[in-house]
Amino acid sequence: MKKLTVFTLTVFLTLMFVAGCISNGPKTEVEGSKIINWVMGADAITLDHTKAEDNLSGEIIYHVCDPLRRSIGGIFEPAVAKDYDISEDGLTFTYYLRDSLWSDGEPVVAQQFVDAIIRILDPRTATANAHNYYPIVNAKAYNTGEITDASLVGVSAPDEHTLVVNLEEICPPFFDVCSSTYPIRKDVLEEYGESYGSEADKFIGNGPFKVKSWTHDISVEMVKNENYWNAEAVRIDQLNRLVVQDGNTRVSMYDKGEVNFVGAIPVVFEEKYEKIHPLSSGAVVALEFNLRGMNPETGKVLSNVNFRKALSYAVDREPLAKAVGGKAWKAAHRVLSDAHMGVADTYHNEYPLQNTLPKNADPAKAQEYLAQALTELDMTIDQLPEFTFLLFDVESYKMFSEAIVDGWEKVLGLKCFEISLLPIPQCIQAGYDGKFDIYFQGIGGNRDPYYNLEYWTTNGAINWTGWSDPTYDQMVADTNRYIDREERFAKIVECEQYLFDHGPIEPLFYSGNCFVYDDEVITGVTTEAFGCAYQFVYADMKP
Amino acid sequence: MSNGSESTSTSPVAAQSSRLGNNEIELTQVDFVIEGIIGEDLEAIVRPSISFWSDAWRRIRKNKIAMISLLFILCIGIGSLVCPIFSAYKYTETNLACANEGPSAEHWFGTDSVGRDLWTRVWIGARVSLCVGFLGAILPSIIGIVVGGISGYIGGWVDMVMMRIVDILMCIPSMIYVILIMLYIGSGVTPIILALALTGWMGSARSTRALVLQLKNREFVLAAKTLGASPGRLIFKHLIPNTLGYVLVGITQAIPGAIFQEAFLSYIGLGVQPPMTSWGQLAQMGSAVFLVYPYQLLFPALFVSLTMLSFNLFGDGLRDALDPRLRD
Amino acid sequence: MFRYIMERLFISMVTIFLIATATFFLLRLLPGNPFQSTTVMTVEMRDQLMSYYGLDRPVIEQYAKYMTSALKGDLGYSFKYPGRSVNDVIKRHFPVSAILGLQALAVGFPVGLLLGVVAARNRGKPLDYMCVFVSIIGVSIPSFVLASLLQYIFGVKLDLLPIAGWGGFMSRVLPTLAMSFGMIAGEARSMRASMLEVSSEDYMKTAKAKGLSSWQIVWRHQIRNAILPLLTGLGLRAASLLMGSLIIEQIFVIPGLGLYYTNAIQSLDYTMVMGLTIFYGSILVFTNFLVDLSYGLVDPRIRIAD
């Protein structure tokens, strides 16, 4: 026994010692060069831009791939496409490409954009991104398998430097989506097949940086791409993105100087830093009411507009946004986010809305609405059924829901709400199945307000409320008939007003998060609410 | 020779000894007067008859540390029932104006990020944590003891099959069961305890089985068998009392385990539903902000630690009190 | 003995098969699907994806398809991470979790045993109370609190060790410590209880009467017998340590498997969950097998009886 113990102990200790000597960290740096160490809370999922659906992958792809037109700080600039043409009827986009190279020196040609779009639409790729390209001729048919000949899809490359996209129906918002397409190399795709984009060496890009290494869930290292057509404008030598899930650790790393740019700082540390920058995420958080209710009693009450307004006016938006969401969160006073751009100014400034919501709770008004609702429903407070308030099991959502429910009790005297937290897939499934009364919904940040409004049409992706209004559906569809932005937006605000007055949602907050860096050391960082949040393409560093 | 207490006649011994000589005494029946049975007390056990459990209680009472721990646990238990009722604030009451304040005269433990009074929340959390801790440790242990005990005792293929079933159940990620339970039964304290019971009994089944395997070949068991003890009597009167020591240590270790399991489940969204909270949840929320507001972590963590300390010390004392070999 | 081993191996295989089956069907019982975590999509889109991946076929058919490829060693591709094969993920991340687990075991088990032995030998004296106290602290503090505290004290305040990362020797100290704490505490208490149980056995008195020195008694008799109940627990504990701890890996930024497992279940990444479950299942079954074997080796009474 003694020998056995001694032997086992020796083995263990040796193992430990050996293990200790095996190094595994990707800390390769070149002295004296400009390096940005950027840390986020999660990692990219894939480098294959045709399949990437999440922001974190999108941010890396933004830096290592180059699209037709690139959005810098919210304004589109020519990228691979140095010029473009939109036909008078709005049904044809023509892009004129410049001479540019991939990071391995191969030229970028128009056919590679065609390949990318076909791949996205190919049912075998099975990506939800396909939906974004449906305005193209035969796109939906190809994607659903109705037709199998890819050459029938309305995208073509008449020569190496021209890309033509044909639409089935006029769709002005689609232009920016289409311009954000990245090219893809068929030869590299064929080499790696299914696993393209899952590793640094199974990928090729044409962007301002190229991927040096990717250690899953640890870091992505990117270095300047010398073959980039605009390489002189790129001043940063190395861009490293680190993944640290724990908020405390991220902050400690910044304090210790191990990183010089922190995205998504936890709320509690916001007070600590002077150089803190709030950034809107372009998303709106709202209460989604199931008009059919989880059962007929709740459905009956929730269908009453005044009841919904009562609940809405009882929420103390601004203080709550700041307390739980932090500096980047704001009270929402209307349905569309304040991050949207109008024609020359912000959308909110150019297109005001009527009857917008107050920043703080309005107890008097809320109680008035409630009284009215109860009269209309012919019920007393005690006769109200119990409502299920459903949300993701995310820490901040939990706090929000608890505070909101407490607010409903304090202001309206209502105690009939039960909070239900579920993991994300189950929560979304419950949403689809209508198993909720009130849903704490995040409405995605799409750059063009059309998409955000389209969510609430009868077949909208997150319209689980049973609200179906043909007038609204028609209004929204009609906005696309106007090519002129000013005219189109005049129609968009009408839709927003309609949704605001009659729709099944009550907006609560405009969400966002804060990031920290020393802007006197790192300059030229651009950010935007939609698309890639943090952009280092034209960043520079003082030594 | 003459002490004179019992004999009523002259001492026949003395008479005999004179007859035979100095070193030889021959004793026959005539030499003795049969007095009869004086009383049963000759074979009486000196101290009063006492059952196994009252003896244990008596012994543990003497253990000061264990008693203090028990007192502490009782105080926490009573506090959890009473303090939230008498507090000036409700545990759901938010007040954004006084968020994230440190301990003060108004808020003895400070407030959290939406201005809720932490004193009240810690005591409310105690209800959930104690409940979950107790039941979430005792239930699986009981199930485990029964299963493991039977399996170990019967042995053979029954043992084999049962242990394989245990192996299989142990490998299926418990999160799946938990989510399923939460979905079909709803959320709250009962489903959590159920989930803990269903996922936690395997460990104690395995160790009980190992213990029983060890014990069943011991001499006292063989002796009892030879004397004709029935299996039931064997299990309940002999095997189980001898396993109790380990079992109790196991339970006292399982109670903090149950509480932390609940905290972990809350971490991934399957714990007690808001606005109800538990120590685990409070500690988890506190650890996210402790670099800036340490008190938000300090109080729940302190309560958890002290309570667990008490459970462990009491468990130790209980185990000592139940050990038949430590009788004095 | 050989026959015994073969029997046990066969049963282990069957066990793993049953584990996979049970997990497969239980997973399918959960509502939701793998595609809903990140994107908002219409019902048609979702149905299209489901049908592409074969998720709308009868469950039995999906089961058969999965099992046939799994038996060939192909655990499929992750749903959540396009293009990443499950085998690859395991190959890349398991060694990290395993090393961390082994380190924690190498530190935790001996230290815990030692504490338990010392406590038992000095029963009732201050040393005993100190050891018990230290071990109880380990059991009383939640792992995430402990990990955060250690990171803060040694990494930030005192700046002695790296806060996070998985590189050279220094960066492994804190995570190993955090991970082994629970084990130290647990083993110390169990060992102490066990040692005390054994100390009143007859053979202990015999050994003393024979005139053996204290150390000889402790080494040859007390520890060997006291360790038995701990071995069963050790098997389980070792396997779970190898699996990686979500919390430790998260706080110290360690690219281990624990994170993958939890995320996989939360996002219903079917292939990942199945692959990891089969993998862990195999480890657990194998470890139990080893423990049962070693039991026979260490305790002659069981060997005879079995």
Image (cartoon, coloured by chain):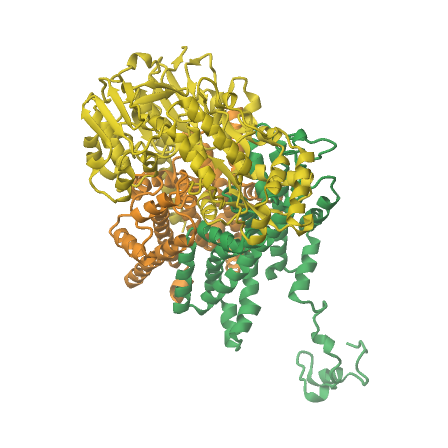
Chain colours: A yellow, B green, C orange
Please tell me whether residue A297 is drawn above or below residue B55 in the rendered image: above
**In the displayed structure, would residue A479 be above or below residue A76?**
below
Asked whether A387 or C28 is in front, the reply is A387
Q: How many marks?
A: 0
The quarter of the displayed image where residue C200 is located: bottom right
Q: Nearer the viewer, residue C28 or B176?
A: C28
Q: Quadrant of the C terminus of chain C?
A: bottom left
Residue B236 in sight:
yes
Which of B215 and B220 lies nearest the eye of the viewer?
B215
Looking at this view, name the residue that lies furthest to the bottom. Answer: B30
Q: Position of residue B204 (x, y in %)?
A: 50, 57
Question: Percent from the top left, x then y, of residue B266?
Answer: 53, 44
Instruction: Say whether residue A506 is visible.
Output: no
Q: Residue B141 at x, y = what percent?
A: 54, 58
- In the displayed structure, would residue B134 be above or below residue B95? below
Say whether residue B276 is left or right of residue A245. right
Q: Is residue C105 left or right of residue C145?
A: left
x, y percent for residue B90: 70, 41
Quadrant into which the N terminus of chain C falls: bottom left
Residue at image position (68%, 37%) is B117
